[in-house]
Image: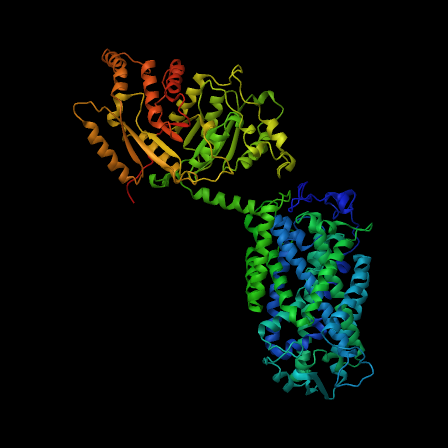
Amino acid sequence: MSNEHAPLLAHGVCGLSVDTAVCGMGGSEGTGEASTPNAVPRKLNTFFGVIVPTVLSMFSIVLFLRTGFVVGHAGLLQGLVMLLVAYIIISLTILSICAISTNGAVQGGGAYFMISRSLGPEFGGSIGLMFFLAKVCACGVYVLGLVEAILDIFGQDSASSSALRVLPQGYWYTVLYSSIVLLLVLLVCLVGAHIFARTSFLILLVVTISLLSIYISPLALTTPLNFLISHQGPGNHTLTYNASYTGFNGTTLRDNLGSSYTVDYSTGKEMSFASVFAVMFTSCTGIMAGANMSGELKNPSAAIPKGTIIAVLYTCIVYVLLFILASSTCERTLLVQDYGFFQRINIWPPFVTIGIYCSALSAAMCSLIGASRILHALALDQLFGFPLAPAAITSSSGNPWVAVLYTWGLAQCVVFAGQLNAIAGLVTVFYLLAYAAVDLACLALEWASAPNFRPTFQVFSWHTCLLGIVSCLVMMFVINPVYSSASIILLLLLLLFLHYRSPTSSWGYISQALIFHQVRKYLLMLDVRKDHVKFWRPQVLLMVANPRSSCQLINFVNQLKKGGLFVLGHVKLGYLDTLPSDPVQQQYNFWLSLVDKLGVKAFVDLTLSSSVRQGTQHLLRITGLGGMKPNTLVLGFYDSCTPEDYFLQDPAFYESEEAGGDDFGVDLPSLQAHFPPVRHVESPRWLTPEEYVGIISDAIKMSKNVCLGRYFFQLQGESMGTKMDGAERIIDVWPLNLLRPGSTSAASVDVCSLFLLQMACVLNMASRWRHARMRIFLCVEAESSDQGWVVKEETFRELLRKLRIRASIKIVPWDSVVQLYGQKQTQDTELGELGLTRPAPALSEDFLSAVNCLLMEHSAQAAVRFLYLPRPPTHSGQSQQYLSQLEAVTHGLGPTLLIHGLTPVTCTEL
């Protein structure tokens, strides 16, 4: 957990590193730790840092200017339903916020910090940017609402001759006034969050006094009041309405119970449940105001849950009482045609005016500060590289003034909407998406069952998280399907961008925890007792001595695995008793970086052993889990050839030094230095012929199929960047045991021959070999008197048809080769009749040379050859002879795979 708050490594997503000198940062800010307690002083407690900003954000402009709008259009019952739905959604989200915020130290960035450290940089960065945009739009909404309230009193109106109405009205004047107000908000925010936090308490006192005056006024104003309300209608016509205040009246309450959606006089659009809910929900978007101040809180893990819950309960009670009061005292016409009606029915109207100005101004400042903190956190984490780099700059007091300027500039663009109701739907959709992301973060942590997820706040479950996600998504599409679809598409694009371009973080990935949880569950369900030959696939353990000389073979086996398990195994020689620590653990990162460089889908398993043979036994026994264990061992060929250094041939290993290291701190020079140079002719070998053949024997005893790969350094087109489909390639299969001609009568249908055919088919199905031509060679004694080879050919063709193998059959007469073998075969038979045991046939050099010439004659043009690998000798003294025979047969052939199969792998049934 020491790296929990470390920044992302090295490079930014735009390919440009964020230079602290360029950004003007120093000290810990340059390392991405500006949000730690040592870098930014924490001054705010629960009341000033969480309760006050949350209450003010939730009151905002809706409290005074849109209560009548909601009750007038939706009626009391539907208005309370909207309030209930909204508070259920935010309550479920609050439970998730409380759980996440009490599971560890919360730094600056609030919701972004929680999501990014819970779900990883992709989700955190994309959701963080969406939440930043929501805050920016909300700031614009509050500023437009404040200007609307100002124009209600001071704006020029043709229906009124009041001396106070001196401000000209119109779209551009509204934008001008909004810009002036926004500039005032900017100046306050540039001073610093702690100054705003102290002034916000005074604002809350003023708003509270205004609220009390609204509640007291119906008790003081007992006589009904009539009002004449006028609006500028279409075609410059003035529309006039008679509206009444009745005081507490049962008839008024009954008339206001049901809904009556009409045209909104501010936008000229017909209202509906969704559009009214969108405006009303903006009053609930402030629940993270306290979380966004996490960088300034003394104890955010305790303050955020406690303060947020208290603030939400308080605002819920206020809104319910206000809805009931409005529906009980005012006729619907007054509610619908005058959104500022509270001023008309107040004992002293300036109370409401001051409350409107204070609440709107504070909500706008809170949104601007919260958005700037999110942007500052994004810049520190270097997720978006150079474009956001200046936003990491802070003042000497820790105020991210550049981020504030960024936010102010975007909010200035929002006010060009001109009307509060016009962008309320977009703001609500953004917030609902952010709330769904918070619920998703908590749900993922709960489902992952990570032992370190131990929040002190326990009043939540995966049910509440899932319900919160579903509720948010449903209400998003109810409000505005177009905005919802566009926001989700934008979120997915940001997520993909960060996934493919961002560096790896040290925060941990929830996806890894979820994958582990699901893989463990499905591995337990993968029962080896239910294996069937129809669903067999190769699961390969490839033993690698030095990757420098084995990369082509690694790439080839990656094509051969057909979606099965692929493990790179390596044995380090040594004794753990004589070492201070296990040297193998330090090597895993280098091998995994090699896998990344090669672009193969392989696991890595390393072991420490006194011998390669013993280490290979360990890996064959313990590699894999459950039903995912290797069934095939692949070895490089044991010969005297001088291997080539693949690192000097592939540009990925020598042309990208300027690109720096990978995401796990392994740079290219370190990777090259870790793996030793290739073996020279005079270099000593770590493996004896007896030990090599012993490894083959051990694998066969353990019922593993064995493959030996030779000359694969000559194979072209297997590297990661190569694009080809194998149209010019040929795959040759020799399914007979060429070193035992006497066994050919049955060899064409034995298990090993069928395994050869299956492996060739698997390769033919790989992406780079799918259009390669496959040829199968049948060696026959054409001069035989019984002509049995004709029947064998037909039988073999029928077998290929049943096995659905598309290949051409080539008949190869090899009478002259069999004659060279005949003398030795006769001697072996005589020894057998005498009861003597011969470990392995001593084949003549002429016979081995003839077999090699036969292969060279017919398979010279093949890209790869599959040959039958005879069983190794039982006596270790015959190991050198066995290897010499294999070397002689395959000499100069090109890429060749010798295979000895023990597993039945073909099936002709459905």
Picture residue at 29% right of the left edge, 21% below the top: 740
Q: Taking 349 as reference, is 381 above or below it?
A: above
Q: In which quarter of the image is the N terminus?
A: top right
Please indicate, yes or no, whether residue 460 appears anywhere in the rendered image: no
Q: In this view, does 836 lie to the left or right of 324?
A: left
Q: Taking 760 as reference, is 281 above or below it?
A: below
Looking at the picture, the colour scheme in use is rainbow
Q: In which quarter of the image is residue 645?
A: top right
Foreground: 700 or 665?
A: 665
Picture residue at 49% right of the left edge, 31% below the top: 568
Outermost residue, left direction?
786
How many tags in the picture? 0
Q: Taking 781 as reference, is 312 above or below it?
A: below
Foreground: 774 or 362?
A: 774
Q: In which quarter of the image is the C terminus?
A: top left
Q: Taking 542 as reference, is 164 above or below it?
A: below
Q: In this view, does 763 lie to the left or right of 804?
A: right
Foreground: 2 or 649?
A: 649
Q: Quadrant of residue 240?
A: bottom right
> How far from the left and from the top, in percent, is residue 254?
61, 84
Picture residue at 43% right of the left edge, 29% below the top: 633
Q: In which quarter of the image is residue 110?
A: bottom right
> How far from the left and from the top, in percent, is residue 841?
31, 15
Q: Is residue 526 left or right of residue 242?
A: left
Please indicate, yes or no, whether residue 844 appears anywhere in the rendered image: yes
> How far from the left and from the top, in percent, is residue 780?
24, 25
> How far from the left and from the top, in percent, is residue 76?
62, 78
Foreground: 305 or 840?
A: 840
